[in-house]
Image (cartoon, rainbow, N blue to C red):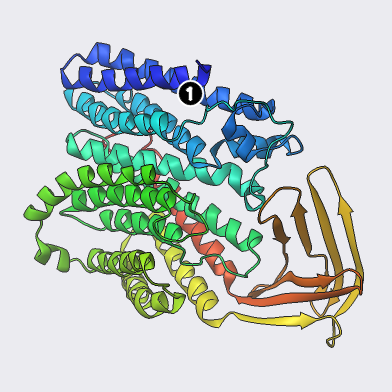
Amino acid sequence: MEPGFLLLATSFVATFSAFSLFLAKKESLGEFSLYLATSTTFAALLLLVNYFVTDTFSIWYVYANSNAEMPLAYKISAVWAGKEGSLLLWVVLNLMVTSLYINWGVKDRKKAKVAAVMTLFTSYLLLNLLIFSNPFTVLPYTPPDGAGLNPLLRTVEMILHPPVVFLAYSLAALLYSVIVANSEGERTIARLTWLSLTLGILIGSLWAYKTLGWGGFWGWDPVENASLLSWLTLTAYFHLTRGRDFFAYLTFSLVLFATLVTRSGIISSVHSFGGEVSDYSYVIPILASLAPLVVRARQFSISSLCNQNLPILFLSAVIVVFLGTIAGVSVEVSREYYFVTFLPVFALIVLLVVLKIKKVSMPATLLHLGVIFLFVGATSVWLFEESKTITLDSEGYKLLDLSISEDAEKYTLTAIVKTPDGVIAPKVYFYKVAGNNRVSSVEIIPTVLWDNYYSIKSFDLDNNVVTLEYYRVPLINAVWLGSALMLLGALLRFSGKVFKLGG
């Protein structure tokens, strides 16, 4: 039996045993099983990393996502590039945050209940990993090289984005479990979850802006929307005095919804893995997660929610984004839908933030200033961005050089162009892998008020001709500044509370 699969099987047995033992009030044995599960799953992840680093193409998952010419950093990031490796990463993070939580502060029966909920959920993920998404499947022969990582994923952001997002997902599961068990540390875990999710979304936005070549940072893609939904409900959680547990439950349910959208391919998305029938198994944990949410909703006072303006506006934003996302199952939803529905709600949220900003602490002031900058920047980009196609016989544009070079993994076409904004050198990479192997490397000339954004649209090497796509992206710096201020404010607010679960 392949060692990695054996490690996963051992981890499943240990994880489910931990759940049973915590449930049976045998906490010491439950802890031992939890630590065994954490160790074996982490060992499986390290083994998979080793397979990628050593080009072990006899493992199907390595063959499908790597090749010998890839740089070491991309081989490591390829570990979580597919649905099998990313699910394994999620399982590892689930078990790690559970192990850390029960050792953080005083151990009691409530923490054992938290661990029981977390290990039950993780057992389900491990079972899915073993039956449907085994990353250690062995090919009947050893290919001489791998198929290679999707070219769009060969970026620095790929190294960071999935781990940060899955950490947020694991923390969302922990927050859900803590509230179900009425255990300590709820607010601290909620802050950690929000911080991780915000950072993950920011990294993804930077990735899209730099890599996809369409001059935008947010495309209202269903998978992007699914992460936004969780962020909105978690943000609403912090603005409630009553009923915040409802939004915490909803946050985790929406995390599971994001998982279903990404893995099943039920809604067309550039981020989805495609999907098989087995990937619809994520419907089961979604339905299970709704149980306490439904119970809490029966006790929930809509009138008290309506008396708190920000939460009701966040809920309105969740509804319009959710409806636009699920409508993608049968129809194509244009970004204009979100401009008409989401932007007015976003504007009202920012208006209330402006009215209340003087009444909050300095960290909260920074955070809310970040929201204001984000709104101004995002609205400017979405509504006022300009684009045009430029031929290099246009006034002010001149092609200085057009060349193509080759290395072990790709061909690189480089156009050196004189523009009114300065000399630029946009590139196009053609990777030596099957499928969609073309990736743009854009050139961005920033100013205070806008970015001059260039990418190569088409070219003709024989006739030395290049056509550029140009975007004037207004106030995009406000998006990055606003995001940075939000993260800084959250970090300052969080300062001193990391080791104080009751904070």
**Residue 100 position (above or below residue 478):** above
| Element assignment for label 1 | helix
Q: Nearer the viewer, residue 289 or 462?
A: 462
**Residue 372 position (above or below residue 300):** below
Residue 91 x, y percent position in the rendering:
41, 32
The residue shown at (30%, 57%) is 233
**Residue 202 position (above or below residue 68):** below
Identify the residue under disc 1.
42
The residue shown at (67%, 28%) is 53
Residue 203 x, y percent position in the rendering:
55, 52
Residue 303 x, y percent position in the rendering:
10, 66
Q: Residue furthest front?
A: 140
Question: What's the amino acid at mark 1?
Answer: Phe
The residue shown at (20%, 33%) is 183
Q: Is residue 500 left or right of residue 477?
A: left
Q: Is residue 3 left or right of residue 431?
A: left
Q: Is residue 366 visible?
A: no
Q: Is residue 45 left or right of residue 432?
A: left
Residue 443 x, y percent position in the rendering:
74, 65
Q: Nearer the viewer, residue 135 or 450?
A: 135
The C terminus is located in which quarter? top left
